[in-house]
Amino acid sequence: MLGTCNCPSRYIARLALASLLLAAAGCSSKSAARPENFIVGLNAHFLDHPECLFPESPAFPYETSDRAKTKQMNTLVASQLLTVQEEFDIHASRYTPTATGARYAPRFCYGHRVVSSIDSFTPPVQANGFPETHVAYHYTIEDVPLWAKPDDVRAAFPAMNHAISGTATDRATLAGTIAGWQVPD
């Protein structure tokens, strides 16, 4: 019969090709320790974890006599996010969100991180039952609201100013799972 060969070399060639395809598929797996997989995991995490002026939610009305806090909060008054009542007898200011400010209060979130590059990462090691790696990365902030862009607000909140500058870096720990790399909560 023409075209049929029970040659061992043909089976070996097919086996070699199948092995190469499996190896190539493993390299593109979302669970492989690769920068593009780390970026996917970090960006998924940051969609649900916005950047905020106040990581801990202050209770409003918020009262302070601290000059540095007063200066910060007054920039939010100028941006029409807060109103202020000054209590001259006790040298304190009481801040309350405006109707516009209520959309952002109490934490005043100003966007979410989008990782642009992985600068370095450690080889994954087993920890808590999963492979873990530590990554260093660059990020930008997306969906920055208009109130966070004026120079006085940026000057009053240096951490936010740095984060929205486009040159921010940070570090994170990622755990490898079947679904890909994730930030452990």
Image (cartoon, grey):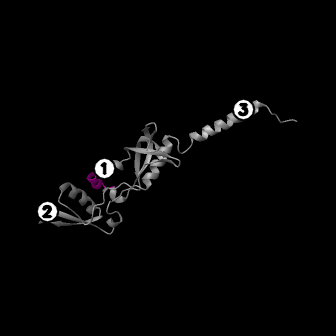
* Horizontal relation, residue 139 to residue 59: left or right: right
Up-down: is 41 above or below 77?
Answer: above
Residue 137 percent coordinates (x, y)? 41, 42
The residue depicted at 26 percent of the width and 59 percent of the height is: 75
The amino acid marked with disc number 1 is Ala
Residue highlighted by disc 2: 91
Secondary structure beneath label 2: loop
Give the amino acid type for the residue marked by disc 2 in the picture: His
Q: Mark 3 points at which residue?
A: 12
The residue nearer to you, when weighing 127 against 79, is 127
Which residues make up the magenta segment?
Answer: 149-157
In this view, the residue in front, 125 or 4, is 125
Determine the main secondary structure of the stretch shown in magenta: helix
Q: Residue furthest right?
A: 1
Q: Nearer the viewer, mark 2 or mark 3?
A: 3
Q: What crowding class fits label 1: few (fewer than 14 Cα within 10 Å), some (14-19), or many (20 or more)?
A: some
